[in-house]
Image (tube, rainbow, N blue to C red):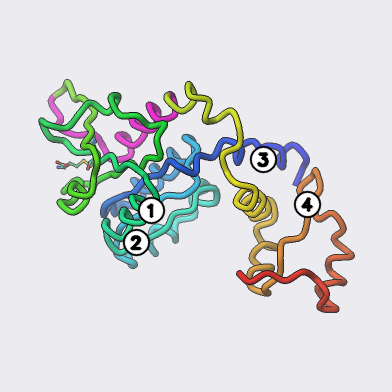
Amino acid sequence: MTAARFQRLRQVLECRQPDLTIVTDNVHKVRNLSAIVRTADAAGIGTMYCAMPDKDYKAFKGTAMGSHSWVSVQRQPDVSAALRPLKAKGYQVLATHLADDSVDFREADYTRPTVILLGAEKLGVSAAGCELADMHITIPMRGMVQSFNVSVAAGIILAEAERQRQLAGLYSERRLDDQAYHRTLFEWAQPKLSEYCRESGLAYPALNEDGELVDGLAWQHAVRDGSATTFDW
Ligand code: SAM
């Protein structure tokens, strides 16, 4: 890890938006999900949720796309299981729904804690998803085709969310709390070591300005003699 690379990881984490996320409602094509993850990363989303069967999720996770390392993608068995905990935390749910009574996506306020709900390739957002939504939004379409590819729709909407959040100064200061920030920074800078720590019940050791252990040798000795700080993962 170079100092420049570590600095880049820190800059990205300083822009992460813990109150902006995506829920996909049975979007199942790997290339669509991968494109959505890349777009989410670019808008500062750190965690998104996929309501989908386990076998589709495994196929998706099996594709080693770079952005998967930077966005946590969590599976939920159905859209209600994905949305209810977020609604309970005060997130508004904006369902992307191609209907006459949906509002133009630019009218929504994306500076609020927000879930953007994206629908399946053929069927769109499910009835359960539509019901749990606070607002139905649509991107105006002026051509002959009736809908965008779901990842394109995600990109258009997230560009507006990014614009609003940038104007509101939400990328100007760190939004992650200390614990989430330092934990994620360690996991990004030291992926293998973080895995070892979690498996061994050890706390993450301190990193220096280059993203390396402050005193790696002393920590290794402490691990060996059992005096390293433990953590209940
Ligand atoms: N027949 C489906 C329907 O009526 O919803 C079309 C699904 S579309 C191919 C897949 C997803 O992309 C949608 O569920 C929505 O999430 C998003 N999407 C596509 N076009 C959109 C638009 N114009 N406005 C908002 N979302 C759109």
Q: Residue at x 24, y 28 (%)?
A: 139
Secondary-structure class at tag 2: strand
Residue type, label 2: Gln
Secondary-structure class at tag 3: helix
Disc 3 or 1, which lies upstream in sequence? Answer: 3
Residue 66 part of the magenta-drawn span: no
Note whether 131 is above or below 77 in the view shown: above
Disc 4 residue: CB within 8 Å of ligand 1: no
Note whether 26 is above or below 200 in the view shown: above
Residue under circle 1?
49
Give yes or no for contact between labels 1 and 2 (Cβ–Cβ under 8 Å): yes
10 Å neighbourhood of mark 3: few (<14), some, or many (≥20)?
some
Residue type, label 4: Leu
Q: Examine the image and state in which quarter residue 11 appears.
A: top right
Query: At which x and y percent is residue 181?
Result: 63, 48
Query: At which x and y percent is residue 87?
Result: 33, 50
For the residues labelled 2 and 4, the Cα–Cα distance comes to 34 Å
Q: Along the line of sight, which residue is nearer the eye, 47 or 109?
A: 109
Note whether 103 is above or below 38 in the view shown: above
- Disc assigned to residue 76: 2
Residue under circle 4?
207
Residue under circle 3?
10
10 Å neighbourhood of mark 1: few (<14), some, or many (≥20)?
many
10 Å neighbourhood of mark 4: few (<14), some, or many (≥20)?
some
Image quadrant holding the C terminus, namely: bottom right
Query: From which residue to which does the magenta span run?
Result: 144-163
